[in-house]
Amino acid sequence: MSDTTTRPRVRLSRELILQAAVKLADRDGIEALTIRALADDLGTRPMSIYHHVDGKEALLDGMVDLIFAEMEAPDPDLEWREAIRRRCRSTREVLSRHPWSVPLLESRTTPGPELLRHHEAMLAALARGGLPLDRMAHAYAVLDSYVYGFAIQEANLPVQGGEEMGEIAQEIAAAFDPGQYPNLVRLTVDHVMKPGYSFGSSFDVGLEILLDGFADG
């Protein structure tokens, strides 16, 4: 445990505590986040944290709101598809920095102002596209499922692309029986192992397919 008596006293605030909690989760994972661990990181005592944040759930609520604040909400001055396109790309970038946050984003029963602002902006963009209410609901659910799911899969890949990806793919392909798995071998050899391959390049392709479907449906 940290020796709080030998460290300079930090002037605590709710914002400082939330930012420190996000940094701790980024560094050690969300499972490592406890009030005591956070207090140790800040060089203070757990009871000092409780003066600013009313327990673990309130801490998580605030952290989720900080994550939403990093995301680019749809710009009301942009064409609706472009606004959503930029929002989804921004969300993917934010989640790549904070992969621990994905399971928490839609789990809060006391949403903060940034979360609510973001959701309102998304719905407004979908409404500008002329989507009826039921299609708006489906579009928002599917878009978030796509972005969140892509972020999780991307975060868990051993590598994202480049020469190292080609080397790993070559090792995997060597274990395949081409007679039994012809399509896996073809995908690996003729696509993944090609120069310039990047798993992330599929993101924009999938996003355009979804936006086309919502616009045409």
Image (tube, rainbow, N blue to C red):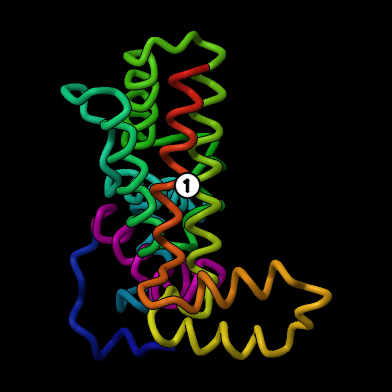
Viewer-proximal residue among 29 and 159: 159
Q: Residue at x 50, y 26 (%)?
A: 213
Q: In the image, is residue 201 part of the stretch drawn in magenta?
A: no
- When asked about the image quadrant of residue 19, the answer is bottom left
Viewer-proximal residue among 119 and 126: 126
The percent coordinates of residue 17 (x first, y second) are: 31, 61
| Magenta segment main secondary structure | helix
Q: In the image, is residue 20 part of the stretch drawn in magenta?
A: yes
Q: Is residue 145 above or below residue 12?
A: above
Question: How many discs mark residues in the rendered view?
Answer: 1
In the figure, is residue 108 to the left or right of 4? right
Q: Which stretch did the figure color magenta?
A: 13-39
Q: Residue at x 57, y 87 (%)?
A: 170
Q: Is residue 143 above or below residue 48?
A: above
- When asked about the image quadrant of residue 173, the answer is bottom right
Task: Report the residue that reaches farthest toward the right.
Answer: 180
The percent coordinates of residue 204 (x first, y second) are: 39, 48
Three-letter amino acid code of the residue under disc 1: Val
Kindly identify which residue carries mark 1: 147
In the figure, is residue 36 to the left or right of 187? left
The percent coordinates of residue 143 (x first, y second) are: 49, 36
Q: Is residue 79 above or below residue 112?
A: above
Viewer-proximal residue among 143 and 197: 197
Q: Is residue 67 above or below residue 48?
A: above
Q: In the picture, which quadrant includes the N terminus? A: bottom left
Q: Secondary structure at mark 1?
A: helix
The percent coordinates of residue 206 (x first, y second) are: 48, 45
Determine crowd level at label 1: few under 14, some 14-19, many 20+ residues with C-alpha closer than 10 A.
many
